[in-house]
Amino acid sequence: MQYVTVTALSHTGLVREHNEDSLVAGPWTLCGTVTENPQTLVFPLGTPLVVAVADGIGGQPAGEVASALTVRQLAAFGPSLDSEEAVRDALNLCNHAVYAAADRDPELRTMGTTVAGAVVRDDAVLVFNVGDSRVLDATADDLCQVSVDDSPAPAPGRTTTSLVTQAIGGAREFSPVVPHVATAPLAAGARYLVCTDGLTDHVPQDEVEELLRLHSGGRAAFELWKSAIEAGGPDNITLALIGIGE
C-alpha cells in the first residue's frame, strides 16, 4: 500500500520577534508557533491530501492572522481538492475570507499572506501558489522549481526581492488573485519541498539540492533549517517535505 509522508518544521528565525508563517498537512495545521524538531506525519495515498505553507506579509499588520486563516481554510477544503479548478476555487475563497476578516476589524486592514503547496492525489500532484513561497520537485538529483514566483525582478546586484505582485489579501480594497496551478504525474519515490522564502531567499538552490541529495525525512528538514539559521535566520522559516513510499 502506498503512503504519503510529510515532514514539517516552522521556526521564527533569529531576527523576527514572532512567527507569521503557518502550515497545513491534511487536517493538521500549525499556525504562528515554533516546532523545536521536525514532525513527520504519515497518510494513506488516496483521498486528496493538501500540504501548504503560508507566509504572512511582513511590514503589514496581522500577517500571522492571514496565514492562519488561509491554511485553516485549505485544511477544511482538503479532501475536495481533486482538480485544478477546485484548487483555484479554494484559493479564491481564501482570498475572499482574508479580505472579509480585515473588513470586520480595522486592526487587520491590509493583512495578507503568500501561499504555496501541493495536493497529492493517487495519480497526480496538483502544485499551486500565490506569491513567492515555493514548491520544488526534489524527485531527481536536480532540484526543480515547479511553482511560479509572483515577484518583480530583483534590484541590480541582488538575487531576491521582498516584494510580491499578488497575495492572498494584502490591499485596502479587494483585489482578485490568479493562482498558479499545475498538474504533474505521481510516481513512487516522488519528493517535493514546500517552503516559505525564509529558506529560499537565504540558502542557495544548489545548497538545498545537495542537502536533499544527502538526507531525507527529519534529517533533511533539520539540515535545511540549520542552513537558513547559519545564513543569519533573518526571516521566519517554514518547510514541509513530501515523500511517496510503499
Image (cartoon, rainbow, N blue to C red):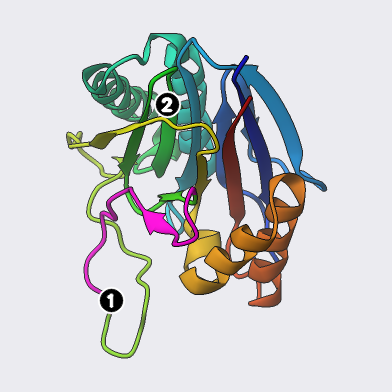
| Residue 29, image quadrant | top right
When the figure is inspected, residue 200 is found, relative to residue 63, above or below; the finding is below
Depth order, front residue of 56/137: 137
- Amino acid on which disc 1 is placed: Pro
Q: In x, y percent, where is residue 173? A: 20, 38
Q: Say which residue appears at 25% left-offset and 35% top-offset.
A: 182
- Of discs 1 and 2, which sits in the foreground? 2
Q: In x, y percent, where is residue 83? A: 27, 17
Range covered by the magenta-colored residues: 139-154
Kindly state the secondary structure of the residue where label 1 is placed. loop
The residue that label 2 is drawn on is 119
CA distance separating discs 1 and 2: 30 Å
**Mark 1, other Cα within 10 Å: few <14 / some 14–19 / many ≥20:** few
The residue that label 1 is drawn on is 154
The residue sitting at the bottom extreme is: 157
Kindly state the secondary structure of the residue where label 2 is placed. strand
- Is residue 227 covered in magenta? no
Q: In x, y percent, where is residue 233? A: 65, 69
Q: In x, y percent, where is residue 33? A: 70, 41
- Amino acid on which disc 2 is placed: Val
